[in-house]
Amino acid sequence: MAQDRFPSPFEVETPAGAEGWEELYSYADVFSEARREYEDNAFWFQDSVHWGWALTPFDGTLMTLCLASLSQYNSRVFKVPPSQGVDARILNGYCYLSPVELSDGGVIESRVPMFMERAGYYFQNWNELYEKWLGKVKENIAELDALDFSPLPESEDLEVVTEGRGVSSGYELLRSYRRFKDLTLKVWQLHFEFLNLGYAAYLDFFGFCKEAFPNIPDLAIARMVSGIDVDLFRPNEELKVLAQKAIDLGVADAFANPGDASAVQQALASSPGGEEWIAAWDAVKEPWFNFQDGTGFYHFDTTWIDKPETPYRFIADYIAKLQAGEDISRPTEEIAAERDRIVEEYTELLGSDEDRQAFQEKLGLARTVFPYVENHNFYIEHWSMSVWWRKLRELGATLAKERIIEREDDVFMFKIDEVDDVLYDIFKAWVVDIAPRGRDYWPPKLAERRRIYEALKEWSPPKALGRPPEVVTEPFTVMLWGITTDSVSTWLGADEGGSDDLTGMAASPGTVEGPARVVISAEDISSVEDGEILVAPITAPSWAPVFARIQATVTDIGGVMSHAAIVCREYQVPAVTGTGYATRDIKTGDRIRVDGSAGTVTILERA
């Protein structure tokens, strides 16, 4: 008998060894008996697009600040008529989301004029407001970067007296952390200032197309806004420039062993053209190589700056292709030509000048706002968060020096507000030159948290919880996460066995056959070889150079407007997203067929 609902969040067992996991997170972020009626009857899906791994306490704080900022723009700022945003919970260390939709027609209707006025102002002044946004984000990054978490000194500098400062280093340390928390929230406030409206404009165009052309594929609509030039592609383009420069300067051989960063750097330092190449690298690494190998939402993500082996490998790949006479440029002209052909084809189907004008206006707005949908990813998830994690590690180093924690990464086992108490303890002990109490208090507590966290990492979270809607209609859920009525039905009927046929979202057109390469995390990306088909839970923006090697992409989750789908279209790589179980059912070496136009994946031959 088919199931009609997913497990209740109150029935899911705690993984062995993770008892007491709730203590790692805020009381407001876990399921509770006090809200059981609401939580048990809602539909919750595991957000593996952004948070596919277990969360430390600090990771969890980042998640909740992000999602609260998302929802406020729908519910309180722009008053999106049918949407209150998404509610979020943590279960056994994993993030679950529930779209909150309004059902009262009167309330929805009353919000329409407010949304039109507020969103309309942004749409009419988009470019000007976007330039202001860029300035605010860069200012926020600079302020984060300038925060000082240095250990407290043995004695204050004489200038504290001669300049009449009136405050000590202890005050400055506590103030810096308070500002750090403010700037953390501000990052996510800025993240969603434009993002929801960017999607809203596209959804408006999408809705018009679906009404005007009832049989139009979702993929055809998405391709009408392709061929975009966005800053998110800039890091990869800079690698191509550096690859060509290595050839021109005669230092290409320095990248013979790109997995050994010190060997590359030593080879460059001893080569005649190496100094010039290093200068070229230094000229672009800030900000463009503040590019994280994951989503940017986790403490274990690393950046190209901090782990240069990653970009060195990509540069080595590009050097080999250039030396073989291959064209490594992105096929922007072909994409634009196909985009314009599709637009012209559908324009001719419209029956009136009024419809054609509306079509062009909505398409024009979608193209105007769409670059932001990808650009924010670099400026927030990558550049902002690279600096943020770096600062947090600097703070961790100070806490380790004070022997509150054993190593700097233990800082991620704190909840964000607990650090205020830790710093107060250090300050209070410093002024009278005694040992902070935290040296005895925190190590056993954090060790227990880390033990629980390690147990949570081994758990496999269910894809969803609670009672699903009869029809999934919330557009962000469909387009970004790739969760549809069909996929929910598939999840309900899924068994433990593997299937030879998978269905997902038609994300990027084309049909290819080839060997699969299953990549679960960024650590595995270097194993991808030319001509393989990438199979992953989801892709990260910093994986873009891999698209020069692969034939196609298949993901477990993600819709037609997910990053994986957008990048594949821009690189003309066939893709099927939101398959649900690709990484479970497909093994590395399996020969598979990917039909990115139909949204199907077939395993032709098992490895």
Image (cartoon, helix red, strand yellow):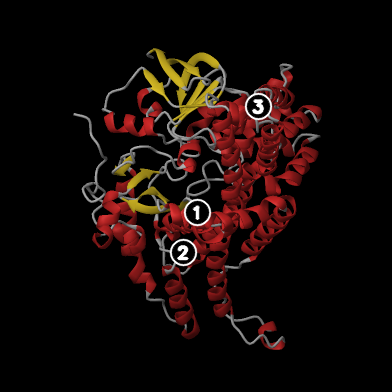
Q: Secondary structure at mark 2?
A: helix
Q: Secondary structure at mark 1?
A: helix
> What residue is shown with label 2?
400
Q: Is residue 153 above or below residue 527?
A: below
Numbered label attached to residue 109: 1
Q: Is residue 188 above or below residue 239?
A: below
Instruction: Find out whether the residues at labels 1 and 2 contact each other: C-beta distance under 8 Å.
Output: no
Instruction: Find out whether the residues at labels 1 and 3 contact each other: C-beta distance under 8 Å.
Output: no
The nearer-to-camera label among 3 and 2 is 3
The amino acid type, in three-letter code, at marker 3 is Leu
How far, Cα to Cα, is label 1 from label 3? 29 Å
Could you tell whether 526 is left or right of 361 in the image?
left
Within 10 angstroms of label 1, few (less than 14), some, or many (20 or more) residues?
A: few
Out of 540 and 30, give the one closest to the viewer: 30
Within 10 angstroms of label 2, few (less than 14), some, or many (20 or more) residues?
A: some
> What residue is shown with label 3?
350
The nearer-to-camera label among 1 and 2 is 1
How far, Cα to Cα, is label 1 from label 2? 56 Å
Numbered label attached to residue 220: none
Instruction: Find out whether the residues at labels 3 and 2 contact each other: C-beta distance under 8 Å.
Output: no
Image point (69%, 21%), residue name: 321
Q: Secondary structure at mark 3?
A: loop
Image point (50%, 54%), residue name: 109
Image point (35%, 34%), residue name: 488
Q: Is residue 154 visible?
A: no
Within 10 angstroms of label 3, few (less than 14), some, or many (20 or more) residues?
A: some
Residue lying at the far left of the rendered structure: 1
The amino acid type, in three-letter code, at marker 2 is Ala
The amino acid type, in three-letter code, at marker 1 is Glu
In the rendered structure, which disc, 3 or 2, sits on the residue that comes first in sequence?
A: 3
- Where is residue 263 drawn, in percent x and y? 63, 36
Q: In the picture, which quadrant includes the C terminus?
A: top left
